[in-house]
Image (cartoon, rainbow, N blue to C red):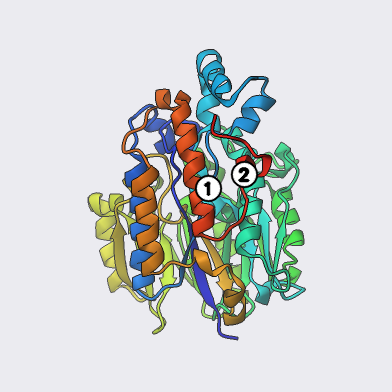
Amino acid sequence: MKAHEVNFDGLVGLTHHYAGLSFGNEASTRHRFQVSNPRLAAKQGLLKMKALADAGFVQAVIPPHERPYLPVLRQLGFTGSDEQVLEKVARQAPQWLSSASSASPMWVANAATVCPSADALDGKVHFTVANLNNKFHRSLEASTTESLLRAIFRDEQFFSVHNALPQVALLGDEGAANHNRLGGDYGEPGVQLFVYGCEEGNTLRPTRYPARQTREASDAVARLNQVNPRQAIFAQQNPEVIDLGVFHNDVIAVSNRQVLFCHQQAFVNQGELMNRLRSCVADFTPIEVASSDVTVQDAVATYLFNSQLLSREDGTMMLILPQECRDHAGVWRYLNGLLDADNPISDLRVFDLRESMSNGGGPACLRLRVVLTPEEQRAVNPSVMMNDTLFTALNQWVDRYYRDRLTAADLADPQLLREGREALDALTQLLNLGSVYPFQQSGATNG
């Protein structure tokens, strides 16, 4: 059956700031305490979405989360009115305010792991929400992510949204950032490659930075998503590259249909993995980048592999890259050589995503890939699908509500909380989502 890959991009939130919360993500740490521009960040993301929609790719949007997230601050013992809670936490424990205000939900590659209907035993599209429990600020995302996915993929005839795994380290799950799908046409059964960083009883693990995805979580996600066991492969991420800043597999590998574009040091026992993929993926085309061409450190600095690899109707592929790749002479030289080589990649498209990149997320971090048949696509909430009208409306919405300068000190401003709630209330109406945010469900006021 003919199907398309639809990219659902996360919209950057109103509290986008540089707090350096993500140990192991070197860009996040390096830009800590710099001044951010939430309005520019949102517009950079919107421009990428619209450009890809204009180029013929099916594109949609996933809204930001409510931030600052007061329910967790109250759970941590801060009491009083909303304004009093903000004042107390800013004075007594500002690190909690920064965590509760993180705009990290914009990186929806971590929102969930997706199984297309062609790969599922029950013939539905499955989503398992990621628990993201390796980082406190990201562990706050699961409940709202689930509400948003249920509001977008409402029709239970076609879609099944699963709760996040239990919030324990043994089941650390980072979503689609550690998941690849390979095969032929999107609507045909494919091979799902689950990538994990560590597993219980295995001493092979990083020593400097944490391995965020566990084998146990990947096994559970595959079961929940009803992935046909014959179509699932599990591979361990190279712990040495995790220690160099490859905190998710999508920082060192990206796949699309028959192509796996990765660094030669991406996986444990990489040669064996490639042979196995050759045996089960028709026309499997690995593009393994040698360290002599691009070092792991340069790949992390430029987010070469945190790119989007998109199929055109003629069978060729386009690589969507951050500006940092063009700015790096060695990486750009490699990429231009790639265009001349014998592979499906025929075009490079560069986007300025510096606001997201400075916090540690590139083009691939900003999107959740969902393969949909025409019938399934019609069942998606149509209000989230990118077109000229939505692009204009979202830009006007950003212009109205977003600040163009934000520091950690600004997070204690009660007006920022009020602005955010008013903005999200308007956005849920624009996108026909219903009451998906805690402040809407609890009847919280802006005071």
Query: Measured from the top left, where is residue 117 in percent x and y?
Result: 67, 74
- Residue placed at 77% from the left, 60% from the top? 223
Q: Which mark is residue 226?
A: none
Query: Measured from the top left, where is residue 101 in percent x and y?
Result: 51, 33
Q: Residue 83 lies in what quarter of the image?
A: top right
C-alpha span from label 2 to label 1: 8 Å
Residue 378 visible: yes
* Quadrant placement of the C terminus: top right
Residue 301 visible: no
Q: Around disc 1, counting alpha carbons within 10 Å, would you say few (fewer than 14), some (14 to 19), or many (20 or more)? A: some
Q: Which mark is residue 440?
A: 2
The answer to whether the residue labelled 2 contacts the one labelled 1, judged by CB atoms less than 8 Å apart, is yes
- Residue placed at 53% from the left, 56% from the top? 429
Q: Residue 332 lies in what quarter of the image?
A: bottom left
In the image as oriented, which residue stretches furthest toward the top?
A: 92
SS of the residue under disc 1:
helix
* Quadrant placement of the N terminus: bottom right
Q: Residue 374 lies in what quarter of the image?
A: bottom right
Q: Around disc 2, counting alpha carbons within 10 Å, would you say few (fewer than 14), some (14 to 19), or many (20 or more)? A: some
Looking at the image, which is closer to me, 174 or 36? 36
Looking at the image, which is closer to me, 13 or 431? 431
- Residue placed at 40% from the left, 78% from the top? 312
User: Which is more N-terminal, label 1 or label 2?
Assistant: 1
The residue under label 2 is which amino acid type? Answer: Gln
Instruction: Tell me: 327 left or right of 41.
Output: left
- Residue placed at 75% from the left, 43% from the top? 166
To which residue does mark 1 refer? 425
Query: Measured from the top left, where is residue 73 in percent x and y?
Result: 62, 26
SS of the residue under disc 2:
helix
The residue under label 1 is which amino acid type? Answer: Asp
